[in-house]
Image (cartoon, rainbow, N blue to C red):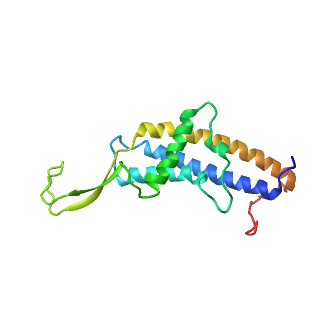
Amino acid sequence: MPEPSPEHLKRQVIRLVHARVDILCAAALAEELLQVSEQDISYRAWGLLTGMVVSYARPFTTSYAYGALEEKWSKFDQRPDLEKHHARLLDHRKTLLAHNDLSPHRAVVVFPTGFVLESGEVVRRAVPTEGRSPIALEGIREVSELFAIQEERMMERCLDLVRRLEEVEGWDPQEMVELNLDADV
């Protein structure tokens, strides 16, 4: 099998570096999310959840610039739990967090005039809002392992590709290399 072209190697490196950084962003947001209480349904908690899931899922959606990640990044030998978490994150992105599809986790509720809130305050006029499910923090802990494994294996593959590209391109060790693709590639 012939050696891939430099453009092909660059495309793979760029795609994987972007993917790895997205995974790192998801991991950072998961750390923040683990600081909220188990019953937190605030905008902040749901914003962190949305950012985490969208960041993780981004590399697994269509990229017209760099192409799709290979299927192997959605597979985990001997770890069906990780495949389950991966699939669930992609599904939550598609149906719950990046789009407004029907979901048992989000509902519009109205507090009618005269309703007595838990605080004892009486609602003066009808107020519509969105009711949301609390975030399952145990699930966040579980996907944190997925993030770490994905980041590690993506970094390992990136380093291998960069080593091959460095050999092919003969980079000057005194110069930083910026990987770009021409618009017509």
Left or right for 171, reference 143: right
Please name the residue shown 43% across and 41% down the image: 34
Number of numbered discs overlaid on the protein picture = 0
The one nearer the camera, 53 or 80, is 80
- Residue 170: image quadrant is bottom right
Q: Position of residue 105 (x, y in %)?
A: 36, 48
* Residue 52 showing in the rendered view: no
Above or below 67: residue 77: above
Residue at the spot x=16%, y=64% of the render?
125
Along the line of sight, the residue nearer the viewer: 156 or 6: 6
Q: Nearer the viewer, residue 61 or 39?
A: 61
Quadrant for the C terminus in the image: bottom right
Horizontal side of residue 74 vs 161, given as left or right: left
Q: Residue furthest top?
A: 78
Residue 110 visible in the picture: yes
Q: Position of residue 96 (x, y in %)?
A: 43, 52
Task: Give the residue drawn at x 28%, y 58%.
Answer: 129
Which residue is most to the front?
102
Q: Residue 7 at x, y = what percent?
A: 79, 59
**46 lies left or right of 174:** left
Rendered location of residue 118, percent (x, y): 18, 48
